[in-house]
Image (spheres, rainbow, N blue to C red):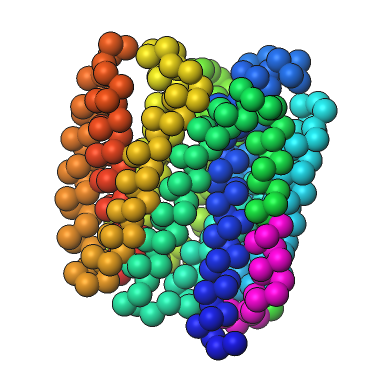
Amino acid sequence: MNKKQNANWILVALLICAFTGMFSETSLNIALTILMTSLKVNAGTIQWITTGYLLTLGIVMPFTALLIQMFTTRKLFFTATTNLAVGTLLGGISFNFPMLLFARILQAIGMGILLPLMFNTVLIIFDKNKRGSAMGTLGLVLSFAPALGPAISGVLIQTISWRFIFFVLLPFIILGMLIGYNKLSDIGNTQKQHFDIFSAITSTIGFGMIVFSFNMAEKSWTNPLTLISLAIGLISLLFFVKRQNYIKTPILNLTVFKYPIFLMGLSLVLICSIVFQGTMIILPMYLQTGARLSVLSAGLILLPGSATNGFLQMVAGHIFDNYGYKRLVFPGFLIVIMSLLFFKMLTPNSSVLLIVLLDIVLMAGIAMIWTGAQLMH
């Protein structure tokens, strides 16, 4: 098998497993009320199903850049997918809250390794004139996953059990692992790296406490616990950043922030991520509480927008390959701003059709920015 075929098989295996992780991220958000009753916990406790997942992602992902240099693609892939598979299985058979929380942490560890590994793989195995199309394919898959989550979990909750949110994912994870076992080869070169303990500690505390503080800010920004957590996180990150300038093998190469084009691209990706994830959480809540729609209906309403987002990321990838990022980023940014302004005017009496159309336009703008900004150079 030639190098190109191996690269394609690697990408397929990564996409299958990453899809399941992204799916599980949003599918449980819509099941939190059911889980409170099933596991006999209150709202403050059950939110840790989401908070714990995000905290773990925030801690693991900064280390993945170093892990990619230290370990082979094959080892990292199987470490990530094993965590994802075990976490998914434990989630389905959980009989109490601590067990479910532990399962979610294992899933987050797997995704924290898989996502950076997947994007790094694309940048290595595809030529510059093909990276836009490849990123578009990633966008298509990763956009459908969080959109399908609420819709499919709504069906499973109403017809079977919340446990099948996990059980339906397990065969796909195993399929991805089998493809990887048979076809996966190593990409890039590895080398022995020094692992700086001080950087690891400050990074873990910094990213973890910042994620925690933003979650606590949902209740109040003036809450002492919120402010103290944010302060500890920021101070720890400051020490982390300082440390990276003095060690030979930094966990994160922060010198890239010296390049304005990289900083602008990263900022745009961050904005798009916030808007996309925020929409996937807030809009279903609005539809269920404000518009009084069922869980299933709220989930289905998100599908057209996410389908548009995925499809346009593929189209935007081709545009990037031929014309560059400017044809995508600037028009997309205007579309996103206008869409959010119209979203702000919605009321409980607004028609469902209007909401669907606004979501489609918003997701189209995000697709344009996302694809162009990720590949700006």
> Quick one: quadrant of the N terminus?
bottom right
- As drawn, is 69 to the left or to the right of 375? right
Query: Where is 314 relative to 322, above or below?
Result: above
- Which of the image's four quarters has the C terminus? bottom left
Classify residue 350 by image quadrant: top left
Q: Is residue 307 above or below residue 2?
A: above
Q: Nearer the viewer, residue 354 or 285?
A: 354
Residue 166: say if magenta.
Answer: no
Residue 363 in view = yes
User: How far from the left and from the top, in percent, is residue 72?
Assistant: 67, 75
At horizontal 38% and vertical 42% (from top left) the residue drawn is 306
Q: Residue at x 61, y 22 (%)?
A: 158
Between 282 and 221, the residue placed more toward the observer is: 282
Q: Nearer the viewer, residue 376 or 360?
A: 360
Q: Position of residue 78 (x, y in %)?
A: 72, 64
Residue at the (17%, 60%) spot, across then down: 327
Seen at 44% across and 59% down, the residue is: 138
Q: Is residue 1 above or below residue 176?
A: below
The answer to whether residue 58 is above or below residue 179 is above
- Position of residue 256 measured from the top left corner of the image (x, y, whole percent): 40, 66
Locate residue 236: give its quadrant: top right
Residue 208: tell me if it is visible.
no
Membership of 181 in magenta stretch: yes
**Extreme-bottom residue of the structure:** 2
- In-image side of 100 versus 188 (left or right): right
How many marks on residues?
A: 0
Magenta residues, start to end: 174-191
Give residue 261's position: percent from left, percent from top: 28, 63
In the visual, does 374 lie left or right of 215? Answer: left
User: Would residue 88 be found to the left or right of residue 353 on screen?
Assistant: right
